[in-house]
Amino acid sequence: MSKSSNPRILLPILGLLTSLLAPPVLAGEEINVYSARKEDLIKPLLDTFSQQTGITVNLATGKEEALLQRLQSEGANTPADLLLTSDAGRLAAAQKTGVLQAVQSDTLNKNIPAAYRDPAGYWYGLSVRARPILYAKSRVKPEQLSTYEALAGPQWRGKLCLRSSDSVYNQSLVAGMIAHHGEAKTETWAKGLVANFARPPKGGDRDQIKAVAAGECDLTLTNTYYLGGMIHSSEPADQEAAAQVAVFWPDAKTTGVHVNVSGAGVTAHARHRDHAIKLLEFLASDAAQRWYAETNHEYPVNPAIPPSATLKAWGEFKADTLNVAQLGELNPAAVRLMDRAGWK
Ligand code: FE
């Protein structure tokens, strides 16, 4: 009998080996997430992740800008490991301020198309949102519609309701126009839109849909999940407003529909970097992608996952293939251009 087969010695060695080869998740393992997504849009997924991995997820939710400021002021002392937020414009802003770090993962690269993630790995898109034209069914025929560019035409004078230029969604849309058409052409276009406003820009995406339904204007641009939310709302007034409008997918023959992402990035000072990557991979997995799409009426970022019935009812569309990181890069130019165009 050799000395090492003494169980009193062997067991601790085995235990050490096991922990070196495959570190088990111990009680007390955790990850801290800052999320600009509302708790009910993310918490059930995080709970599933905890059940599967044994990693406790501590969630802090807040407004996009406030969370970014908090990360900046906390610096190296931040408890946050992962920042979840919406819009490539905001993800790029987070990257620019230095609060994110680049990570690489074969799983993420496989599940998320290149157009929907930062080329250097600072952030990854986790859901896709499309911003098509919404029109008043009773006053506009889809044959009258074609492209974003055509919305600036004189036939739509006084017919257009849009959110303000403060909206990062509109900033990203304009950034996409700059990427495709250049600044000069985009500025002329933006001036044409402003000339067509039915009223000064105000309200959120839902308010634009309500304004079209109320007859204040005939056309607007919104992210489709707002329409999905109103269709499935418990408020009859929301349902009635949603029933007045239809989706038109512009630029089917040209650049495609403007799309953006919600996404997440590992923080620069993450203490649980590996867990953060694991959580990102979980959020890009089939089950999580399906849940995202069903619950918030967004499009799965993973093309293997079919969209929900609500989304299917709006029909298929050609999405812009521009890398959404470009929307962030061109954000400052877009903001200046909207200002020059008089887009309040
Ligand atoms: Fe939104």
Image: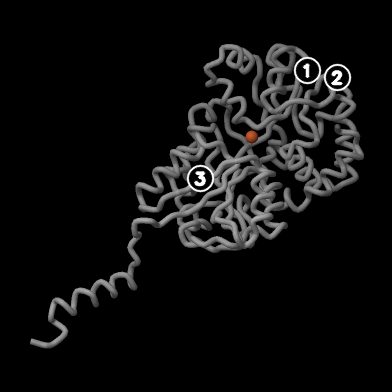
**Residue 98: horizontal and vertical position, in percent?**
68, 60
Q: Amino acid at mark 2?
A: Gly
Give SS at disc 1.
Answer: loop
| Way the structure is coloured | one colour
Above or below, 280 relative to 262: below
On the image, numbered disc 2 is attached to which residue?
158
* Sooner in the amino-acid sequence: mark 1 or mark 3: 3
**Residue 84: horizontal and vertical position, in percent?**
58, 47
Q: Residues within 10 Å of mark 2 (few under 14, many from 20)?
A: some
Q: Residues within 10 Å of mark 3 (few under 14, many from 20)?
A: some
Quadrant where the C terminus sits is top right
On the image, numbered disc 3 is attached to which residue?
59
* Sooner in the amino-acid sequence: mark 2 or mark 1: 2
For the residues labelled 1 and 3, the Cα–Cα distance comes to 40 Å
| 12 left or right of 80 in image | left
For the residues labelled 3 and 2, the Cα–Cα distance comes to 45 Å
Q: Amino acid at mark 1?
A: Cys
Give the label on residue 217, or none.
Answer: 1
Give SS at disc 2.
Answer: loop
**Residue 65: horizontal and vertical position, in percent?**
69, 44
Q: Is mark 3 within 8 Å of ligand 1?
A: no
Q: Are the residues flagged by discs 3 and 2 in contact, CB closer than 8 Å? A: no
For the residues labelled 2 and 1, the Cα–Cα distance comes to 7 Å
Q: Are the residues flagged by discs 2 and 1 in contact, CB closer than 8 Å? A: yes
Q: Which quarter of the frame holds ligand 1?
A: top right
Question: Which residue ends up furthest to the left in the rendered image?
Answer: 1
- Is residue 121 visible from the viewing direction of this image? no
Q: Which mark lies nearer to you, 1 or 3?
A: 3
What residue lies at 14% left-to-right and 87% top-to-bottom? 3
Give SS at disc 3.
Answer: strand
| Residue 4, quarter of picture | bottom left
